[in-house]
């Protein structure tokens, strides 16, 4: 997994919801890579990775300070529960030059987390895209954050259209 920068601080203030999203991406990565059970991974994060530690452990040490654990659980469970539909939708909106199977596994986990959270209409799409762009910037420094922006925009439009039509439309992939 790439080195993780701390995306959970904005002007020195903690961002627990962003920390939950980072953790969800890491958990989904672990589930995919190791074939671990969802509840087992969630429990590992709750017990061993969340919160502050006596020795001040940070992201680099595998800890995630001050995360919104309710949001974390929700994202991971929703993403896994809808994985097949989300994966198909993500595949449909990816550019032809970035097939799903060739994407970095962290990027796949990020799309899955965003898609799982995006099923809930309570957070405006631009805010979700911005949040996951911050998460992408914490993992990647190349073209991936721009790809995240375009794919999530297309994915959320597809999801909203499917909610209105009752079925997924056949949009063209993004450029």
Image: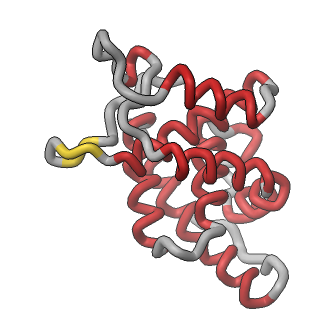
The coloring applied to the image is secondary structure
Query: Horizontal placement of 111 versus 77: left or right?
Result: left
Residue at 42% in and 40% down: 67
| 119 left or right, relative to 38 | left
User: What residue lies at 39% left-to-right and 24% top-to-bottom?
Assistant: 59
Q: Which of 72 and 27 is in front in this view?
A: 72
Quarter placement of the C terminus: bottom right
Q: Can residue 15 be seen in this view?
A: yes
Residue 168: image quadrant is bottom right
Q: Quadrant of the N terminus?
A: top right
Q: Which of these two is toward me, 155 or 112? A: 112
Above or below: residue 63 compared with residue 151: above
Identified at 38% across, 18% down, the residue is 60
Q: Where is residue 82 in the image (x, y as percent from the top left)?
A: 79, 57
Where in the figure is residue 127, as x and y percent of width and height?
41, 67
Q: Which residue is the extreme one toward the top?
A: 55
Residue 118 picture location, percent across and down? 60, 65
| 65 is higher (above) or lower (below) than 146 | above
Q: In this view, does 129 lie above or below 39?
A: below
Residue 78: image quadrant is bottom right
* Res. 105 visible in picture: no
As drawn, the residue found furthest toward the bottom would be 165
Q: Position of residue 72 (x, y in %)?
A: 55, 46
* Circle count: 0
Left or right: where does residue 166 sit relative to residue 78? right
Q: Which residue reaches farthest left? A: 11
Residue displayed at 61% across by 70% down: 120
């Amino acid at each position: 997994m790439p080195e993780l920068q701390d995306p959970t601080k904005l002007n020195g203030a903690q961002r627990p919801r962003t920390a939950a999203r980072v953790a969800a991406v890491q958990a989904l990565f672990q589930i995919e890579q190791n074939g671990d059970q969802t509840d087992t991974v969630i429990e590992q994060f709750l017990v061993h990775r969340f919160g502050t530690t006596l020795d001040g452990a940070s992201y680099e040490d595998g800890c995630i300070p001050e995360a919104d654990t309710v949001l974390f659980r929700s994202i991971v469970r929703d993403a896994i529960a809808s994985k097949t539909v989300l994966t198909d939708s993500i595949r449909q909106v990816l550019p032809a030059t970035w097939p799903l199977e060739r994407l970095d596994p962290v990027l796949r986990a990020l799309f899955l987390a965003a898609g799982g959270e995006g099923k809930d209409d309570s957070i405006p799409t631009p805010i979700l895209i911005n949040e996951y762009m911050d998460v992408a910037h914490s993992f990647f420094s190349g073209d991936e954050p721009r790809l995240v922006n375009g794919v999530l925009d297309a994915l959320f439009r597809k999801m909203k259209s499917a909610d209105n039509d009752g079925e997924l439309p056949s949009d063209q992939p993004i450029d």
